[in-house]
Every structure is written in C-alpha cells, then in structure tokens.
Amino acid sequence: MASHEQSYRAGETKGQTQAKVGQAMEGMKDKAQEAKDRTSEMAHSAKGTAHEKTGAAKDKTSDAAQATKDKTSGAAQETKDKTAGAAQATKEKASGAAQATKDKASEMMESAKETAQAGQEKTGSILSKTGEQVKSMAQGAADAVKHTFGMADTAEDPHATKTPREP
C-alpha cells in the first residue's frame, strides 16, 4: 500500500513539474513573441528614418534581437536545468522509497518465515509426544486384553498362570 502511495506521489510530483515547465515555456514563448514584435516594430521605424540613421538603427535592432535571443536562450536553458534537477530529485526520491519498501517487505518475509519455522517445530514436538502417548495407551490396552483372555506372557504379567507357548 505504501509503494502505491509513493508511486502516486512521485507521479503527482512529476505531473506538477511538467505543468510548471509547460507554464514557464509558455511564458517564455510569450516573452519571445513580444520581443520579436518589438524588434519588428523597431525595424519598421528604422526604415522610415533618414539614410544616415539607417546604419545605426540596423545595428541597434540587431543588438536588441541578439540580446533578446541570448536572454530567451538563457531563460530556456535555466528552465530546462531546473526541470532536469526536479525530475532527477523526484526520480531519486521514488527510487529511495521503492528500495525502502523492498527492504521492509524482505524483513517482514524473514520474520514470517522464522515464526512459521518456530510453529512447525512446536507442532512437531506436540505431535511426537501425542504419538508416544497413543502408542503407550495402545500397548496398555493390548496388555489388558491379553491379560483378560489369559494370553499374557509371564514376563508381561506376573499373575499369569500359563506358561508362554514356544513356537
């Protein structure tokens, strides 16, 4: 039962992590789109200015685009790294929980085995004693029947008057 719960929690954590990564990626896409839109607007504005400023505007736009690209790339890499770290931590936690469950099950099996073995030894001892008692009672009954019918050997019955027959 604990293993199922731990697997559920690990799955839940993984799902939450994936949802957060998805949200972060959507946010990054939105920011990238906004940056792209701004860059595009800046490019159109630069085309409308005089030829002297055209070169400076192109450089500025290019720099802004590169900075946006670098920023987006850095943010995406950071998100990817965080997600990988969270996934690894979840994996390690789930692995540890599975090992703990496996160890506990092994301990419980060993304990059950020892208990069963002790019960078996006790039962064997009781059955052995009971067998000896039944054997003794049967011998006593056989001797009583022999004595009653006068078939008892003198060694078995000192009161017997007959002598044992020889074959």
Image: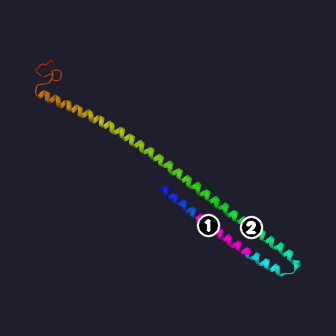
Give above or below for 10 relative to 100.
Answer: below
Dominant secondary structure of the magenta stretch? helix
Examine the image and state in which quarter residue 157 appears: top left
The front one of 113 and 59 is 59
Give above or below for 77 relative to 140.
Answer: below
Give above or below for 126 relative to 65.
Answer: above
Residue 46 picture location, percent across and down: 82, 78
Q: Is residue 31 left or right of residue 140?
A: right
Residue 145 picture location, percent across and down: 14, 30
Q: Label 1: which residue?
A: 20
Q: Amino acid at mark 1?
A: Lys
Q: Amino acid at mark 2?
A: Lys
What residue is rendered at 21% in x and 33% in y? Answer: 137
Q: Is residue 93 left or right of residue 113?
A: right
Q: Label 2: which residue?
A: 71
Magenta-span inclusion, residue 30? yes
Which residues, given as a range, are shown in magenta? 16-36
Mark 1 / mark 2, whichever is N-terminal: 1
As drawn, the label of residue 161 is none
